[in-house]
Image (tube, rainbow, N blue to C red):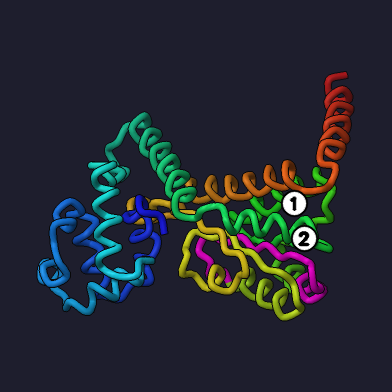
Amino acid sequence: MSTNACFASIKNHYHTLTKAERSIADFVLANGHQVTEMNVAELALAAGTAGSAVVRFCKSVGYTGFSQFRLALAKETAASPSPFLPLIEENDSASQIAQKVFASAARTLKNTLSISGTDNLEQLAHKIVHAGKVYLFGVGTSSPIAQDFQYRLLQLGYCASCYTDILFMSVAAANMQEFDVAIAISHSGRTTATLDALKLAQEHGAITAAITSYQSSPLAKLADYPLTAYPDDINYPVEAVSARIAHLCLLDALYVILAVKNDRNSAMHIETRNDILGKIRKEINS
């Protein structure tokens, strides 16, 4: 856990917290500076909970205990005195709304990189290099993200297939084999069809990865290599555009790692892609 992503971790785990833990989360989110000066008993009293709930809360949001949590909180509040993004309000102008949406996207990308790290990206890239086939699963708003990454993998010469139809997802997953890689994409990490496809892929010996926005979601817990975005869903309760941007950036980073680090002739494949695009553009312009 990064030492400067405390607020993002609380928000990411918020919907999985117990009632008592949410009370603590609400107090911390509203009074971060004050909490850095408190002990367990004082925070419990302020939040109206027991001391044991404070300890459970710290562990639920990714820390070993209160001491580590308070240290991370102190570092974050010192570096960023105003950790909250303003809510979009009904009387905001178009300019204000745009500024808040862009600020949310920037914060989401910063938090995602800070908390997620790069270990899973590097390990997943290694698995893809040696994979038989790569299967991508995603429905709804996740389907164009899956399709985009399929296209990028094909550019590099990988055998990649994308499935966005619920029936096709299950049939495809049932045909996966050892050394194949399944990548499931879901904002909530709870989409039944996507989760079922990844389970089926795993049962058939495939390597599994997940792109989601919740570290504690069933999809993230199931995958061998979970990659998590950290959108601002408390301030923006609908599925934020920033989440999809973060998912794309995670996969773009994976694409570039593969292009730079793998042992295939990526340059040759990209040159071939550019030649094809050049011919298409000439035909369109003629």
**209 left or right, relative to 108:** right
Q: Which residue is mark 1?
A: 150
Q: Nearer the viewer, residue 209 or 265?
A: 265
Closer to the eye: label 2 or 1: 2
Residue 37 % position (x, y): 13, 57
Q: Residues within 10 Å of mark 2 (few under 14, many from 20)?
A: many
Residue at screen point 80% across, 56% down = 160
Image quadrant in which you'd find residue 1: bottom left
Residue 56 % position (x, y): 29, 76
Q: Quadrant of the C terminus?
A: top right
Q: Which residue is mark 2?
A: 134
Image quadrant in which you'd find residue 233: bottom left
Residue 55 % position (x, y): 26, 74
The secondary element bearing badge 2 is classed as strand
Residue type of the residue flagged with mark 2: Val
Q: Is residue 136 magenta?
A: no
